[in-house]
Image: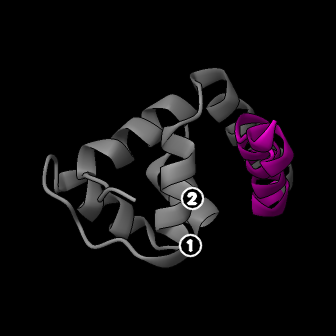
Amino acid sequence: MTALTGNDIKTVRDRSGLSACELADLVGVGCSSIYRWEDAGKTKPKIEGRPRNLFSIMLNLKQYQMRDIAEAFREGGWILALNKLTSFAYKKAPRQADKAA
């Protein structure tokens, strides 16, 4: 897995339409972390665990998918948003049986 840059975090936030604090709530960090990571620009801030995994998945989604996740978050909180994120991620990833065929 490649390291995420501050610009990657900003891209995720721009695509989703979420505020920094909404994105922070979704991935389980404080607002200041999002601002600090975005300020890193092209450098690679230290992001580990669940936030790193979520950002990596979100970075590969299309803008309409990110907007759907943001809408789900605003309507039902992070659990609904993560369910939507998971459904997009699994639709994109080929199943093991499909790879073998």
Q: Using the image, tell me which numbered label, if any, was put on residue 101.
A: none
Q: Residue furthest bottom?
A: 49
Provide residue 69's location: percent of width, then percent of height.
Answer: 72, 40
Q: Quadrant of residue 14?
A: top left
Q: Which mark is residue 54?
A: 2
**Secondary structure, magenta segment, majority class:** helix
Q: Is residue 9 above or below residue 36?
A: above
Q: Are marks 1 and 2 in contact (CB under 8 Å)?
A: yes
Q: Which residues are magenta?
A: 77-101
Image position of 77 (left or right of 32): right
Residue at the (13%, 55%) spot, across then down: 43
Residue shown at the point (81%, 45%) measured from the top left = 95
How far apart are labels 1 and 2 at the CA level?
6 Å
Q: Helix or strand or loop: what does disc 1 sit on?
A: helix
Q: Amino acid at mark 2?
A: Leu
Q: Is residue 99 magenta?
A: yes
At x 63%, y 60%, the residue is 26
On the image, numbered disc 1 is attached to which residue?
A: 50
| Label 2 SS | helix
Q: Position of residue 70 (x, y in %)?
A: 68, 40
Q: Where's residue 79, x and y in %?
A: 82, 62
